[in-house]
Amino acid sequence: MKRIYKLNGCLQHYVWGGEDYLPDLLGIEKQPNQHYAEWWLGAHSSAPSMLEINDTQQPLNAFLAQNPTALGDESRAVFGTELPYLLKILDVKQPLSIQLHPTKQQAEQGFARENAEGIDLKDSKRTYKDNNHKPEMMIALSDFWLLHGFKAKADILADLQARPSLHTLAEKLQTQDPHAFYADIMQADQAQLSAWLMPIVEANQVRYKNQQLSLNNPDYWVLYTLDAMQISAEKLDAGLICFYLFNIVNIKEGKGIYQDAGIPHAYLRGQNIELMACSDNVVRGGLTPKYVDIPELLKIIDCREIVPEIIPSAENRKIFTYPTPAKDFALTHIQYEPAESAQLHAANAEILLVMDGELKISTNSTALCLKQGESAFICADTDYRIEGARQGYAVIARLP
Ligand SMILES: [Zn+2]
């Protein structure tokens, strides 16, 4: 068995994706009217990456089943026979659903319960697709906007009180606890949503069209989301109210954020690198035509006030691992110049993705040249060397 293999990822063409960013990054031909939402690097069985072995291609999950030692002892002891993480590049052109992810224990219980209830894994009303938690970290590749956690109650009240149609909500929040308050909003009917939102939409239409609304103003994002997702006035989504409840966060290129279990979040616009535990457990809370499991959402949502913690950027550091609390994954940023080299060691399986420039990755017996958009799978227990060929940087997904 070799220690390093070229790895080819999988594209996901979800309709919220943009048309240009991923084809340009990956150097692939654009198809007309095609959406390029996500690029996946990992062993997830629904879209495993392909290893180049001699002149053939083998799915990474099949390779790992045949060669479990490639995962590493520590990885196997904690995470079993699966690669614990999934690395993605996202191009968010339209807002994604408001969502949150369960804890490991909630996922185990939810998965067992839905199995016992006989809900098929492919059923649209299935919430738990596996028994794993799904912490996520992301690093922005452009100016990035997202919703992240409930903001301070005083800030929510100020936003609600500043808008006549939301005064009744401000009064409710003063008497209700945040969880009951949020539950009522999520169960509001169309007439109620319309009474809250349409006066705001009508009052801001002209300012929105003339680009006079600040991006920190929730009204901007309500109008933007109606426009981008083509939501009609008759089919308002309770998730739209969340722009007044959650932190609207702007992440500058190179910086990031971590989504812990229970924290509601929604990606609004931009491109990023995302690294997450290998799971598909998403509990949705609006801005989606997909199934919204309100009882489950209310059971696991964390309604505490959150102050977003921004992950710092690598700046001028040659090798930098982004600090996060995650136990299932870590992301390392490595910068290189021509002829500059670094000696590294993979204790457990790693995935390297060249984001810019060109590098050579080598062991005593193998060498690969990788350019922007190309990646490699590195087996556990491997000493390897990275040498810059053209200035740039790569990211390495691995265990902490
Ligand atoms: Zn998420």
Image (cartoon, rainbow, N blue to C red):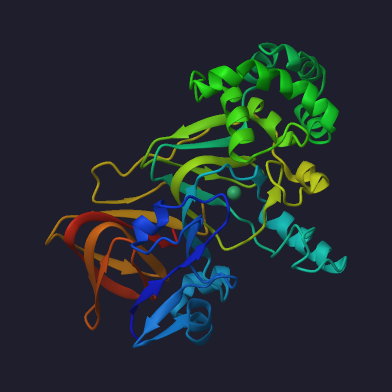
Q: Is residue 12 visible?
A: yes
- Tell me: residue 263, above or below residue 30: above
| Left or right, residue 163 beside residue 91 | right
Tell me what residue is drawn at x 66 percent, y 50 percent.
101
Identify which residue, 263 or 375, lies in the foreground.
Answer: 375
In the rendered image, the vertical position of residue 15 relative to residue 26, given as above or below? above
- Name which quarter of the figure residue 22 lies in: bottom left
Q: Is residue 292 left or right of residue 67?
A: right
Q: Nearer the viewer, residue 368 or 205?
A: 205
Where is residue 66 shown, x and y percent of the image? Answer: 51, 87
Q: Quadrant of the C terminus?
A: bottom left
Say whether residue 11 is left or right of residue 111. left
Q: Position of residue 351 (x, y in %)?
A: 39, 66
Residue at 83% from the left image edge and 62% from the top image edge: 113
Seen at 43% across and 40% down, the residue is 311
- In which quadrant is the N terminus drawn? bottom left
Q: Measured along the vertical axis of the image, is residue 61 above or below residue 128? A: below
